[in-house]
Amino acid sequence: MEAIAKKHSSLLSSITPIQGVWDNIVMDTNLKVVEKLIQEALELGGCSTKRAVIEEALREYVQRRKQLKVIELFGKIEYDDDYDYKQQRQQQ
């Protein structure tokens, strides 16, 4: 699997994976992170490793950014005043 991922890395990076499909693909990296921040996150989040803290932080970051994109749509979508969602539910 790792060889396939390396061979097709440009293709894979352009695909938005379905949740859970690519969870086992890991990228090794070296990061310089403020130690005090990591320690505080370890204490607050209850994670046992620095890696777990960083992964959780990245997941929360991505989730928050997706939420912000949805929030940007408020007021931009026009709704039909005559639309009756209750009637739609009864027809199903």
Image: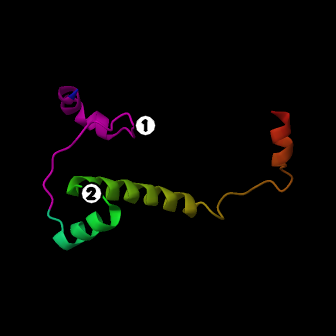
> What residue is pinned by disc 1?
18
Of the two numbered discs 1 and 2 on the same chain, state the one appearing first in sequence: 1
Taking the image as shown, residue 41 lies to the left or right of residue 29, namely right
Alpha-carbon neighbours of circle 1 within 10 Å: few (<14), some, or many (≥20)? few
Query: x%, y% of residue 27?
Result: 20, 43
Quarter the N terminus occupies: top left
Quarter the C terminus occupies: top right
Rendered residue at 21%/57% (across/down): 50
> What residue is pinned by disc 2?
54
Examine the image and state in which quarter residue 15 appears: top left
Query: Callout 2: helix, strand or loop?
Result: helix
Query: x%, y% of residue 41?
Result: 29, 66
Q: Is residue 15 magenta?
A: yes
Work out whether residue 49 or residue 68 is closer to the camera in this orientation and state it. Answer: 49
Q: Amino acid at mark 1?
A: Ile
Using the image, determine if residue 11 lies above or below residue 44.
above
Using the image, determine if residue 19 lies above or below residue 5.
below
Please, what is the dominant secondary structure of the magenta stretch?
loop
Query: x%, y% of residue 77?
Result: 67, 57
Query: Callout 1: helix, strand or loop?
Result: loop
- What's the image's color scheme? rainbow
Rendered residue at 83%/56% (across/down): 81
